[in-house]
Image: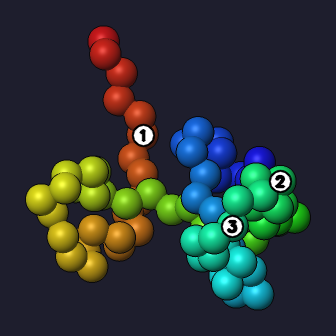
């Protein structure tokens, strides 16, 4: 598991370019071969997790401003 697993339980597959052709092969049926394609030593190498606006969670919102990093304040409490 990569470091991104601490943020979300689902991890996208970062497929190296040299595996694209095999990954996109619609005739592939060997499940072990397909699983091996996803075996990547450092799956999230070069990926950075940064906080962004909660507006990114609304499907109707679209735009580059949604991925601008934000500063996190102190966590609020219920009381």
Image coords of residue 74 (percent x, y):
42, 40
**Crowd around label 2: few <14 · some 14–19 · many ≥20 (10 Å):** few
- Above or below residue 46? Residue 37 is above
Q: Which of 73/65 is in front?
A: 65
The structure residue drawn at horizontal position 63% and vertical position 63%, both measured from the top left corner, is 13
> For the residue labelled by badge 3, is the local secondary structure a helix, a strand or a loop?
loop
For mark 3, what is the residue? Answer: 28
Say which quadrant the C terminus sits in: top left
**Crowd around label 1: few <14 · some 14–19 · many ≥20 (10 Å):** few
For mark 1, what is the residue? Answer: 74
Q: What's the colour scheme?
A: rainbow
Q: Quadrant of residue 78?
A: top left
> For the residue labelled by badge 1, is the local secondary structure a helix, a strand or a loop?
loop
Q: Nearer the viewer, mark 2 or mark 1?
A: 2
| Measured Cα–Cα span from mark 1 to mark 3 | 50 Å
For mark 2, what is the residue? Answer: 32
| Measured Cα–Cα span from mark 2 to mark 1 | 47 Å
| Of the image marks 1 and 3, the number of the one nearer the N terminus | 3
Image coords of residue 66 (percent x, y):
27, 68
Q: Which residue is at the far right?
A: 41
| Of the image marks 2 and 1, the number of the one nearer the N terminus | 2
> For the residue labelled by badge 2, is the local secondary structure a helix, a strand or a loop?
helix
């Amino acid at each position: 598991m990569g470091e991104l697993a601490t943020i979300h339980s689902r991890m996208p597959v970062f497929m190296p370019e040299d595996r694209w052709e095999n990954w996109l092969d619609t005739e592939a049926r060997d499940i072990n071969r397909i699983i091996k394609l996803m075996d990547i030593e450092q799956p999230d190498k070069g990926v950075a997790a940064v906080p962004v606006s909660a507006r990114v969670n609304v499907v109707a919102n679209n735009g580059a401003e949604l991925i601008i990093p934000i500063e996190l304040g102190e966590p609020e409490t219920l009381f």
